[in-house]
Amino acid sequence: MIGYSDSRKDAGKLSTAWALYKDQEELIKVAKQYGIKLTMFHGRGGTIGRGGGPTHLAILSQPPDTIHSSLRVTIPRKRRLF
């Protein structure tokens, strides 16, 4: 599972996004080397600061070769206030 919120608190939005991008590339490289089928599971939060935002943009921004036949993403529930 790739988490977003804690790392963004510590390192900031841009450096976290770049680090996660590079880490995903490295994971795919190692998986290919050992013949492992790897499915990325993205634990995105609800707000932008926690990794949220439009899902289609998140999918389009993934590194090449990290999405093949499947991708798992958590989609937080929207809360209603009464």
Image (spheres, rainbow, N blue to C red):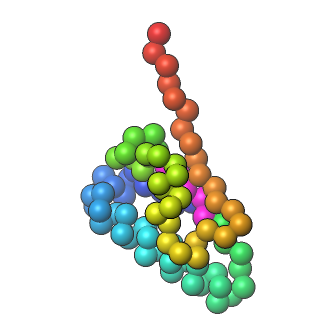
Q: Residue 41 location in percent, x, y?
A: 60, 59
At horizontal 59% and vertical 84% (from top left) the residue drawn is 30
Q: Which residues are magenta?
A: 40-44
From the viewer's perspective, is residue 73 above or below residue 38? above
Asked which quadrant contains residue 14, the reply is bottom left
State which quarter of the image contains the N terminus. bottom right
Q: Residue 61 location in percent, x, y?
A: 46, 63
At horizontal 51% and vertical 80% (from top left) the residue drawn is 26
Q: Residue 59 location in percent, x, y?
A: 53, 58
From the viewer's perspective, is residue 69 above or below residue 53? below
> How many numbered circles does the render carry?
0
Whether 29 is among the magenta residues is no
Q: Residue 35 location in percent, x, y?
A: 72, 85
> Image check: 23 left or right of 73?
left
At horizontal 52% and vertical 52% (from top left) the residue drawn is 56
From the viewer's perspective, is residue 39 above or below residue 53? below
> Image check: 31 left or right of 42?
right
At horizontal 71% and vertical 66% (from top left) the residue drawn is 69
Q: Main secondary structure of the magenta part?
A: strand
From the viewer's perspective, is residue 8 above or below residue 53? below
> Image check: 15 left or right of 27?
left
Q: Residue furthest bottom?
A: 33
